[in-house]
């Protein structure tokens, strides 16, 4: 039964990738071997690996959303964020590592969208690990060529008069989008605003939308 | 587009024709998270750089991109980089992989770290 997948869906609604209960693969064997060799040679420890996994698991689009919501509320912060997103993120207390971050502001006149045509560079410290489609051949190939069509497949239909700027990331330079603040959100708190900022709105494949009242 | 003659390597995909964007999504399993952690830790300790990671991924070629999963390609590249930086030898790796394989037939059995 092709649709009978409910037994294999995680709380987030996504299927688990085959893991502990499937036959050991060659590459899993290599992962175990590499990890154990690194521990035996005192290059790392099991604890350090677990701590790193926890740190990555703790990263989610909520971090980027907090930056965006503050930028919406605090013009001075927005200026800082646009001038030096790495410094502004650190000032908010976020560990962004050595990444050079660049914030792109969506306006009524320009829509920005982010891609990595060469690989999968992504502002992972702000948004968590990238979605599978971000790493796909289809997204990497087509976004620079037909961004308007790609956006419409994500449900974002922009007027033909609206310029779209496509930003191709590199390993050392990672972009994220400050989406437009939705209309009708003047009375919302910064936290409530942050809840409107989706992952896709910060990649540029979505927009932030006001809550339905 | 003729990818053989436009001077670009296979991974340089920007602007090529491709099909619809799939919205399939999966949660990362433990072994994939461990691969990710090894990349961050070993590059942070100076054993290799993100450019080294990418060099091996790109040299693995298009077939690997089509047939191996993302983190399968990453562990292959991490391993190659670690051998190049003398973290361990190919012989040590082979011995360890045989030892791991002998522990059991599932990832859970073969991985001692919990």
Image: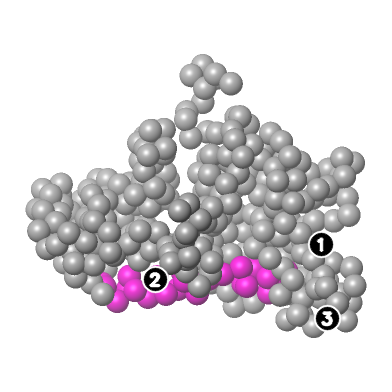
Question: In this picture, is A178 found above or below A169?
Answer: below
Viewer-proximal residue, A53 or A154?
A154
Residue displayed at 12% across by 49% down: B94
**Badges 2 and 1, same chain:** yes
Verify whether residue A77 appears in magenta.
no
Residue at 51 percent of width and 16 percent of height: B5
Give the structural element (helix, strand or loop) at label 3.
loop
Graded by Cα atoms within 10 Å as few (under 14), some (14 to 19) or many (20 or more), the crowding at tag 2 reads some
Instruction: State yes or no: residue A56 in magenta.
Output: yes
- Is A191 left or right of B43, judged from the image as shown? right
- Residue range in magenta is A45-68
The residue that disc 2 covers is A52
Residue A7 is left or right of residue A73, and the answer is left
Q: Nearer the viewer, mark 2 or mark 1?
A: 1
Q: Distance between the Cα atoms at labels 2 and 3?
A: 35 Å
Cα distance in 3D space between marks 2 and 1: 33 Å
Q: Chain of mark 3?
A: A
Dot 1 surroundings within 10 Å: few (below 14), some, or many (20 or more)?
A: some
Question: Residue A19: x percent and y percent?
Answer: 33, 62
The colouring scheme, among rainbow, by chain, secondary structure or one colour, is one colour
Mark linked to residue A180: 1
Give the quadrant of the C terminus of chain A.
bottom right
Residue, x 38% and y 63% (percent of image)? B29
Q: Quadrant of residue A188?
A: bottom right
């Amino acid at each position: 039964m092709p649709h009978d997948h409910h037994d294999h869906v995680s709380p987030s609604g996504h299927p688990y990738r085959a893991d502990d209960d499937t036959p050991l693969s060659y590459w899993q064997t290599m992962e175990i071997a590499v990890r154990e060799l690194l521990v035996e040679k005192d290059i790392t420890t099991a604890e350090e690996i677990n701590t790193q996994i926890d740190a990555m698991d703790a990263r989610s689009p909520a971090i980027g959303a907090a930056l965006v919501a503050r930028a919406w509320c605090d013009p001075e912060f927005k200026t800082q964020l646009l001038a030096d997103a790495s410094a502004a993120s650190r000032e908010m207390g976020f560990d962004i590592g050595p990444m050079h971050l660049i914030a792109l502001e969506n306006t009524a006149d320009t829509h920005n969208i982010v891609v990595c045509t060469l690989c999968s560079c992504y502002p992972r410290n702000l948004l968590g690990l990238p979605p599978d489609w971000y790493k796909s051949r289809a997204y990497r190939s087509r976004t620079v060529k037909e961004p308007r069509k790609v956006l419409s497949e994500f449900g974002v239909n922009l007027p033909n008069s609206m310029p779209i700027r496509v930003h191709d990331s590199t390993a050392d330079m990672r972009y994220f989008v400050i989406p437009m603040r939705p209309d009708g959100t003047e009375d919302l708190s910064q936290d409530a605003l942050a809840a409107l900022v989706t992952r896709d709105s910060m990649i540029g494949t979505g927009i932030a939308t006001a809550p339905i009242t | 587009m003729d990818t053989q003659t436009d001077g670009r390597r296979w991974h340089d995909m920007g602007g090529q024709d491709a099909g619809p964007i799939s919205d399939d999504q999966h949660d990362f399993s433990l072994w994939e998270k461990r691969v990710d952690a090894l990349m961050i830790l070993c590059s942070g300790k100076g054993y290799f750089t993100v450019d080294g990671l990418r060099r091996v991924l790109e040299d693995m070629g298009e077939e690997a991109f089509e047939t191996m999963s993302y983190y399968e390609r990453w562990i292959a590249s991490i391993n190659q980089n670690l051998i190049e930086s003398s973290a361990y030898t190919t012989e040590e790796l082979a011995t360890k992989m045989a030892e791991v394989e002998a522990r059991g037939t599932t990832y859970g059995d073969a991985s001692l770290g919990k």
